[in-house]
Image (spheres, rainbow, N blue to C red):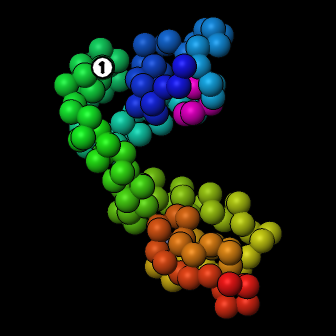
Amino acid sequence: MQAHPHEIAIGFFDGRWNVDDGFCYPDPRNAFSSSEEALQFLHDLTGEQIGQDAAEWEEWFANCPPDLLRLMYDGYPMVIQSLNHPDFPKRVLAATERWQDTTARICSKCTALCPEYREHCWACGFKVGRASAMPE
Ligand SMILES: [Zn+2]
């Protein structure tokens, strides 16, 4: 069974991923490193401030129209790529760790490392453009 990211996140609150039951693939226990991270994902996705209450979240999603759910998933990258997001410095750090041996190019909007083959900054989504030396 394929679970949606929000279903995986909710599963962290009621412990449903604590047993090795091979419930679905990829292993949902690898999706978030903690229930706090799962909760941050749900807050970013929905804009709601519900706590770590699986039943409350399940009810919220059960009442969420499919069109709205699709819009929330479409908008999610813009939320986490916002320079105002509390976890944005972690994204800049992750880009540094990932590409420090690959490039010295820095995004002019957020200062994250951005390899020449990328057209958009991974951290903030800014269109930095591919380096001109790259073949078309
Ligand atoms: Zn950037």
In this view of the protein, which residue sits in the foreground, 74 or 109? 74
Work out whether 111 lies above or below 131: above
Membership of 30 in magenta stretch: yes
Residue at 47% in and 68% down: 125
Report the quarter where the N terminus lies.
Answer: top right
Q: Residue at x 40, y 31 (%)?
A: 6
Picture coordinates of residue 131, whole percent (x, y): 66, 86
- Could you tell whether 100 is left or right of 2 in the image? right
Can residue 39 be seen here? yes
Is residue 36 visible to the viewer in this orientation of the structure? no
Q: Residue at x 40, y 66 (%)?
A: 83
Dot 1: few (<14), some (14–19), or many (≥20) neighbours within 10 Å?
Answer: some
The magenta stretch is: 28-32
Q: Is residue 77 left or right of residue 102?
A: left
Residue lying farthest front? 136
Left or right, residue 55 beside residue 117: left
Name the residue: 57% across, 25% down.
Answer: 28
Give yes or no for residue 8 being in the magenta stretch: no
Residue 67 at what x, y percent from top left?
Answer: 24, 40
Q: Would you identify the image quadrant in which residue 99 lies?
A: bottom right
Instruction: Give the image location of residue 63, x and y in percent.
Output: 19, 25
Kindly state the secondary structure of the residue where label 1 is placed. Answer: helix
Q: Which residue is farthest bottom?
A: 132
**Residue bearing the label numbered 1:** 58
In the image: residue 6, left or right of residue 130: left
- Which amino acid is tagged 1? Glu
